[in-house]
Image (spheres, coloured by chain):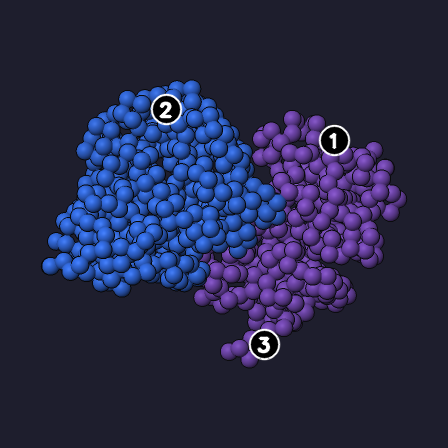
Chain colours: A purple, B blue
């Protein structure tokens, strides 16, 4: 694995290797001093063209726990907001000797471009590109599901909401399918991409029909800008048909868990009661995010020659 | 000045000689020695009437960093063209007699091929108010083709008025068929692949809905509509239906929609970003069939040069468009001639006679016969070349065929008897 751009690129063995490594990280950091020396001397750049405090912080923490040097490049207060191109930013980071670039960008394919346009030699990790993919989110979701449900082979996972615009949905469908899970996507037809019937998952417009059999249910965030673009008549109607409330939660099997990639719209796709319930593993997901990102950084950079040998 | 073209095959027919005297074809047939004539050995070469492009972006005035009339027409000559229609979406827009006359004059000065400016349908191609179509028609540029290309004339009443108005001077409205409200933020063909790549879809229906409306309008007001860059199977069907009714509808397809498909977007390489977008295999097959059976009248390049920075970026930020003048004939050979869908007479029709007829260019797209203007191109049908982006007369390098092996090569181009291009630099004139 040279870059992590999309879960569609990962085979089952690679996924399992990342999840197992994350588990290893969990044991190693489950002690008073959480830091490992593994990536000492390596430089990891967080290049965020979109605001995302939680994802950026998670990557930052992951890199620091592996003793890498971390630089944060954010859109606000830098050349990025002054219209510097992705290419020029990339060339700058290359010149500064970045070993890995964690990129978040509003354009689908931005991470792919960064990795393949010949601008940089650094490893590229996609931290969310437009409406395409968000692979580390899918990895941390799978990690969380695995820790509660064990092997995901044959498990039923339901993803609910704005599948059309969701990079989390795309990454989850590919990854969970590779792990043998039976995935369903549920949402209003207006928020399903054309061609979704060719994805390796079931498609349903009826949430109530899906909850009874679910082992895990992920509620996708509904972006504010969708609420005024005729994708659905009103937020209340959306919440009634596709929101997870206490009543629907009660219809879930006893062991089923509730996930959300965050940030939540409480009262929209998920009620506060559900979000704060015992079935909710949403806070756990955050912690697992750091472990999975440590695993990805380790697997991408740990195998490289040590910085001392490089120089 | 006389040029004797020895042993060429006009429209792929029997071998003959062709004598150019001054700006006209003087004789066709087996000819002996002609005193004082420059001899061009054309054994094995096909002779076609000079190609005519209905859809070229020359970018001047305004974006001379991407192309100028001079560089664009040099590229045209290298591609075998003797006339191009220069689209109106320049800066300033070609929506007045002043701008179209400037472009026309720049073409005359460059001398590589005739430049016929296309006039904007609406002021500033803003889709609000008719531009002074009559003034452009009456100007020295004698504009007959009007288009807001790049934008659709989406207002139905405005489109109707434009169609009606140009009847006064035998004009034609060339429509960029794209329902704007269905393509907000659109990046590529809408289908399974756009869903997978997370790129906003440009659905076929956005093109087809406008074509359906406009062929009905053209029939209603009995005026000529020309559909630019037809890209979907549904569009071909609609145009076939309109023609079966005898309605005054013509259409063009680009070389890239004859050859390339949406799969190329997988690379997220903006070289493949174009409007209308590259479509599916089924669509490619349908436009080839439509071109073969005459439903689609014309191959038009939609040559759209862009500066390096407009393409060396992420997909969503990149400009739409690709080069096409220097590769058009080769793509037609690969997609139509070699598979047996079109013979050389068909190529001459779709790339020269038909566009000249639609654009009302009296001296282009003529037969290769004595007394006709000596606008012609010599083509080596057996040649092959790997396209190199850097080897181009165009100022821009956004070439989607770079690295591809394409058949057929233009060997020489003559504009009214004067050599405007000669491969290997051996100008005949």
Residue A273's place in the image compared with A81, above or below, is: above
User: Which label's residue is closer to the chain start, 1 or 3?
Assistant: 1
What residue sits 51% from the left and 61% below the top?
A: A116
Residue B35's place in the image compared with B82, above or below, is: below
Q: Are the residues flagged by discs 3 and 2 in contact, CB closer than 8 Å?
A: no
Q: Secondary structure at mark 2?
A: loop
Question: Closer to us: mark 1 or mark 3?
Answer: 1
Residue A305 is tagged as 3
Q: Callout 2: few (<14), some (14-19), or many (20+) C-alpha neighbours within 10 Å?
A: many
> What is the quadrant of residue B115 in the picture?
top left
The answer for how far apart the CA atoms under marks 3 and 2 are is 72 Å
**Residue denoted by label 1:** A241
Q: Tell me residue A156's x, y (percent).
A: 81, 47
Chain containing mark 3? A
The answer for how far apart the CA atoms under marks 2 and 1 are is 51 Å
Same-chain status of marks 2 and 1: no
**Residue denoted by label 2:** B223
What residue sits 62% from the left and 40% below the top?
A: A194
Q: Residue furthest bottom?
A: A309
């Amino acid at each position: 694995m040279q870059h992590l751009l999309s879960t569609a690129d990962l085979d089952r063995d690679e996924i399992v290797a990342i999840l197992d490594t994350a588990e290893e990280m969990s044991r190693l950091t489950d002690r008073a001093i959480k830091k490992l020396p593994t990536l000492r001397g390596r430089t990891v750049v967080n290049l965020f063209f979109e605001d995302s405090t939680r994802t950026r912080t998670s990557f930052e923490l992951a890199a620091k726990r592996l003793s890498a040097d971390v630089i944060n490049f954010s859109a606000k207060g830098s050349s990025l907001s002054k219209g510097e191109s992705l290419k020029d930013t990339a060339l700058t980071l290359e010149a500064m000797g970045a070993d890995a670039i964690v990129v978040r960008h509003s354009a689908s394919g931005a991470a792919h471009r960064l990795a393949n346009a010949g601008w940089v030699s650094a490893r590229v990790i996609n931290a969310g590109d437009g409406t395409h993919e968000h692979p580390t989110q899918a990895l941390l979701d799978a990690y969380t599901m695995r820790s509660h449900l064990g092997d995901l082979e044959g498990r039923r996972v339901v993803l609910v909401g704005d599948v059309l615009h969701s990079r989390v949905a795309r990454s989850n469908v590919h990854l969970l399918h590779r792990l043998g899970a039976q995935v369903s996507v549920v949402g209003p037809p207006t928020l399903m991409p054309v061609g979704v019937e060719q994805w390796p998952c079931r498609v349903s417009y009826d949430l109530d029909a899906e909850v009874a059999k679910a082992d895990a249910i992920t509620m996708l965030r509904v972006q504010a800008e969708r609420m005024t673009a005729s994708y659905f008549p009103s937020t209340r109607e959306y919440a009634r048909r596709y929101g997870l409330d206490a009543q629907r939660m009660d219809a879930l099997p006893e062991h089923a868990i509730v996930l959300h990639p965050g940030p939540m719209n409480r009262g929209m796709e998920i009620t506060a009661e559900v979000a704060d319930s015992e079935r909710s593993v949403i806070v756990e997901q955050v912690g697992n995010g750091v472990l999975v990102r440590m695993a990805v950084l380790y697997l991408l950079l740990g195998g490289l020659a040590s910085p001392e040998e490089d120089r | 000045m006389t040029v004797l073209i020895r042993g060429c095959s006009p429209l792929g027919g029997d071998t003959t000689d062709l004598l150019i005297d001054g700006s006209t074809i003087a004789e066709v047939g087996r000819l002996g020695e002609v005193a004082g004539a420059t001899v061009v050995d054309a054994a094995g070469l096909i002779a076609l009437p000079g190609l005519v492009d209905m859809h070229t972006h020359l970018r001047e005035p305004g974006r001379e960093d991407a192309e100028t009339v001079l560089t664009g027409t040099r590229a045209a000559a290298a591609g075998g063209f003797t006339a191009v229609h220069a689209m109106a979406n320049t800066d300033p827009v070609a929506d007045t007699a002043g701008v179209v006359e400037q472009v026309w004059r720049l073409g005359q000065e460059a001398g590589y091929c005739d430049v016929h400016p296309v006039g904007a349908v609406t002021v500033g191609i803003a889709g609000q108010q008719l531009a002074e179509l009559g003034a452009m028609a009456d100007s020295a540029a004698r504009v007959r083709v009007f288009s807001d290309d790049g934008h659709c004339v989406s207002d139905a009443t405005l489109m109707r008025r434009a169609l009606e108005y140009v009847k006064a001077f035998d004009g034609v409205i060339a429509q960029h068929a794209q329902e704007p409200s269905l393509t907000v933020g659109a990046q590529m063909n809408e289908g399974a692949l756009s869903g997978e790549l997370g790129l906003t879809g440009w659905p076929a229906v956005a093109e087809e809905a406008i074509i359906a409306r406009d062929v009905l309008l053209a029939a209603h007001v009995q005026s000529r509509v020309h559909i630019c860059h037809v890209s979907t199977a549904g569009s071909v069907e609609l145009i076939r239906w309109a023609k079966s009714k005898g309605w005054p509808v013509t259409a063009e397809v680009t070389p890239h929609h004859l050859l390339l498909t949406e799969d190329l977007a997988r690379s997220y390489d903006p070289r493949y970003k174009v409007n209308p977008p590259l479509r599916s295999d089924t669509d490619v097959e349908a436009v080839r069939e439509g071109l073969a059976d005459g439903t689609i009248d014309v191959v038009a390049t939609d040559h759209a040069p862009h500066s390096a920075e407009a393409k060396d970026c992420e997909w969503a930020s990149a400009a739409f468009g690709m080069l096409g003048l220097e590769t058009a004939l080769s793509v037609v050979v690969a997609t139509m001639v070699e598979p047996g869908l079109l013979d050389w007479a068909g190529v001459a029709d779709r790339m020269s006679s038909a566009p000249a007829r639609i654009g009302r260019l009296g001296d282009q797209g003529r037969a290769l016969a004595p007394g006709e203007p000596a606008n012609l191109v010599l083509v080596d049908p057996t040649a092959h070349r790997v396209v190199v982006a850097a080897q181009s007369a165009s100022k821009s390098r956004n070439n989607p065929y770079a690295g591809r092996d394409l058949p057929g090569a233009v060997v020489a181009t003559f504009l009214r008897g004067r050599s405007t291009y000669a491969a290997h630099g051996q100008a005949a004139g």
